[in-house]
Each structure stands twice: as C-alpha cells, then as structure tokens.
C-alpha cells in the first residue's frame, strides 16, 4: 500500500476511535458506543473500493472497529 493510502487509513482509523470515544462521553450506555463504532466501520468499508487493495482496507476497518469497541465502557 502506498504511503498516501497508509496515511489515509491511519486518519480513518483515528476518526473511528475518536467517534467511539466521543459517543461514549456523550452517552451513558456501552451499546450506543458499540453501535457508533459499527456505523463508522460500515462507512469505512463502503469507501474501501477506492483503494487498490479493498480487502486489506476492509481488514483495517475491522481492526480499528474492534479497537473502538474495546474502548467503549
């Protein structure tokens, strides 16, 4: 994966984690945080067709979503 694509994936990953943390801070339920993580994961996966290796992109989206969900409390 090129450097630009790697940086784009890092930005998307950071956004997913930030979304999960923000949702957790704004709501009291873990379920809403998990739902937000999954929603952002779906949005990330929907953009993977823009990359040369969509399967690797989807894997990164899923890994980041797992990290996001792990941070839901």
Image (cartoon, rainbow, N blue to C red):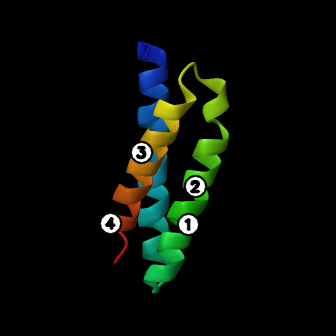
Q: Are marks 3 and 1 in contact (CB under 8 Å)?
A: no
Q: Earlier in the sequence, mark 1 or mark 4?
A: 1
Q: Which mark is residue 36?
A: 1
Q: Earlier in the sequence, mark 3 or mark 1?
A: 3
Q: Earlier in the sequence, mark 2 or mark 4?
A: 2
Residue drawn 58% across and 44% down?
44
Residue 12's x, y, as percent? 50, 40
Residue 18's x, y, as percent? 44, 55
Q: Secondary structure at mark 1?
A: helix
Q: Alpha carbon of mark 3 to alpha carbon of mark 4: how far?
A: 14 Å
In the displayed structure, does residue 26 sit left or right of residue 49? left
Q: Is residue 8 above or below residue 73?
A: above
Residue drawn 57% across and 55% down?
40
The image quadrant where one finds the N terminus is: top left
Q: Which mark is residue 70?
A: 4
The residue carrying mark 2 is 40
Q: Is residue 66 above or below residue 27?
A: above
In the displayed structure, does residue 53 sit left or right of residue 64? right
Q: Which mark is residue 14?
A: 3
Q: Quadrant of residue 39?
A: bottom right
């Amino acid at each position: 994966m090129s450097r630009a694509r790697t940086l784009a994936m890092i930005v998307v990953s950071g956004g997913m984690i930030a979304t999960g943390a923000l949702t957790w801070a704004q709501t009291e339920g873990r379920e809403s945080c998990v739902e937000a993580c999954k929603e952002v994961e779906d949005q990330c996966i929907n953009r993977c067709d823009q990359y040369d290796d969509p399967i690797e992109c989807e894997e990164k989206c899923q890994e980041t979503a797992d990290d996001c969900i792990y941070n839901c409390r």
